[in-house]
Image (cartoon, rainbow, N blue to C red):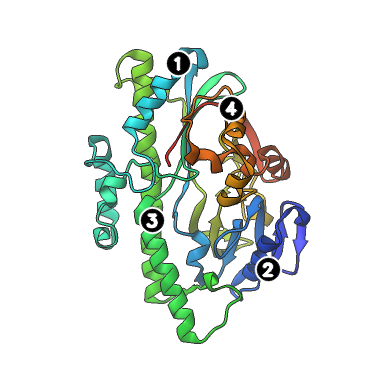
């Protein structure tokens, strides 16, 4: 652990963090409602408002931009009894996943799928407002992947078992909710005449109607994200069932373990004997024995872990590799030949739009995991053999 000023603790050497991110950490730690300190994870990098890979404990306020606009983004992983040799014709398998799960920004289901109807009903039942007024197509987005660094992969662990893994969040509805409350928080700070070190550190005061509205909508979007991952994974499992048994109806025989975890979220937890708001911006909850997934970039290892409940980290751990280069810089530094070399032996869609997702654009996941030794225990190491991404 490394101390940065009075109110920030880093789980990586400060000299490995870019200057802009260090300043963001200092800015966040300077806010008057910070509880104890800001905990910075080993995969941290510059983000909007607060550093990605930051755990922020607060009393009496929350910062909407610290959660961000992909509310509830996270990972889902399913262990199967299959071995790699059981899955043949990987190009056809990838094509079936791409047909079954809409992907890329703005791509939705044509209708509410029968598999999604129950989950849509769950969200309707817990809705404290009409979310169609915020995003009319939210029901059609349940069961869609999105673009950017969101992915579906098939991988094998150290024992040869096949895992299905998936990274996604709350899609357009989460984006609109997050954006709306970031702006409202900025309006509130402006009305107070308060000057902040960064406008994206604008906060909402607990005990106000606006705070309550945000927490209600945030919790709903977080549940949307969790159910969205479950819905997509169920579809992937149906494809694996059909590939294995000739029918999509035997998914139960293929599911040994399912893990579903957020890494952009806020909730109330007890730390140092006090109830506080914990915002994890690019970090997972890591209570003792809690299972989660920490993915690498496409083409590199990922890890199934269990938490070690480190109190200084507010029971948290890193969420992935973290970017080393921006998307723009990655496109200047790397070529399609570099991508093809990095993805050797992996079935994936060869497209220029994926160039900024090249493994070299991300931090070394093994270095991240070395710095996370006091935060999690590695249970399985995964290496993908099939990758699916949208634009």
Q: Are marks 3 and 2 in contact (CB under 8 Å)?
A: no
Which residue does the numbered mark 3 point to in the structure image? Answer: 174
> Is 215 left or right of 133, judged from the image as shown?
right
* Residue that label 1 marks: 87
Label of residue 383 in the image: 4
> Label 1 neighbourhood size at 10 Å, few (<14), some (14-19), many (20+)?
few
x%, y% of residue 226?
Answer: 40, 45
The residue that appears at 78% across and 56% down in the rendered structure is: 15
Q: Bin the neighbour count of mark 2 within 10 Å (Cα to Cα): few under 14, some 14-19, many 20 and up.
A: some
Kindly identify the residue that appears in the image at 39 percent across and 20 percent down: 92
- The numbered mark, 4 or 1, whose residue comes first in the sequence reads 1
Q: Secondary structure at mark 3?
A: helix
Q: Quarter of the image containing the N terminus? A: bottom right
Q: Considering the numbered disc 4 on the image, is that residue within a helix, a strand or a loop?
A: strand
Q: Which residue is mark 2?
A: 26
Whole-number angstrom distance, CA of label 3 to CA of label 2 = 28 Å
**Is residue 390 in view?**
yes
Nearer-N-terminus badge (2/4): 2
């Amino acid at each position: 652990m490394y101390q940065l000023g009075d109110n920030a603790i880093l789980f990586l050497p400060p000299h490995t963090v870019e200057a802009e991110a260090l300043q963001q950490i200092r800015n966040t730690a300077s806010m008057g409602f910070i509880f104890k300190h800001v905990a910075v994870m080993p995969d941290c990098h510059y983000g909007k408002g607060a550093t990605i890979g930051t755990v922020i404990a607060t009393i009496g306020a929350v910062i909407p931009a610290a959660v961000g606009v992909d509310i509830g983004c996270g990972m889902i992983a399913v262990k199967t009894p299959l071995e790699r040799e059981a899955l043949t014709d990987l190009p056809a398998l990838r094509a079936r996943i791409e047909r079954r799960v809409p992907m890329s920004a703005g791509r939705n289901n044509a209708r509410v799928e029968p598999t999604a109807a129950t989950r849509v009903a769950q969200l309707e039942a817990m809705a404290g407002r009409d979310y169609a007024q915020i995003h009319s197509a939210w029901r059609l987005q349940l069961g869609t992947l999105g673009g950017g660094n969101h992915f579906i992969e098939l991988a094998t662990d150290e024992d040869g078992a096949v895992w299905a893994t998936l990274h996604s969040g709350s899609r357009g509805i989460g984006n609109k909710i997050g954006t709306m409350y970031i702006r409202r928080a900025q309006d509130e700070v402006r009305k107070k005449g308060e000057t902040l070190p960064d406008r994206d550190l604008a906060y909402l005061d607990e005990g106000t109607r606006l705070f309550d509205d945000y927490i209600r909508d945030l919790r709903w979007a977080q549940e949307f994200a969790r159910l969205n991952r479950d819905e997509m994974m169920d579809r992937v499992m149906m494809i694996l069932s059909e590939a294995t048994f000739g029918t999509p109806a035997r998914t139960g025989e293929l599911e040994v373990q399912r893990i579903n975890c957020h890494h952009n979220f806020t909730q109330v937890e007890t730390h140092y004997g006090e109830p506080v708001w914990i915002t994890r911006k690019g970090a997972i909850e890591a209570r003792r024995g809690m299972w989660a997934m920490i993915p690498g970039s496409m083409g590199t290892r990922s890890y199934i872990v269990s938490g070690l409940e480190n109190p200084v980290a507010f029971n948290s751990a890193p969420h992935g590799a973290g970017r080393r280069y921006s998307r723009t810089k990655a496109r200047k530094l790397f070529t399609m030949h570099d991508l093809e070399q990095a993805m050797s032996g992996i079935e994936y869609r060869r497209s220029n739009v994926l160039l900024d997702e090249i493994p070299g654009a991300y931090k070394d996941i093994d270095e991240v995991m070395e710095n996370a030794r006091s935060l999690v225990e590695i249970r399985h190491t995964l290496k993908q053999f099939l990758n699916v991404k949208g634009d």
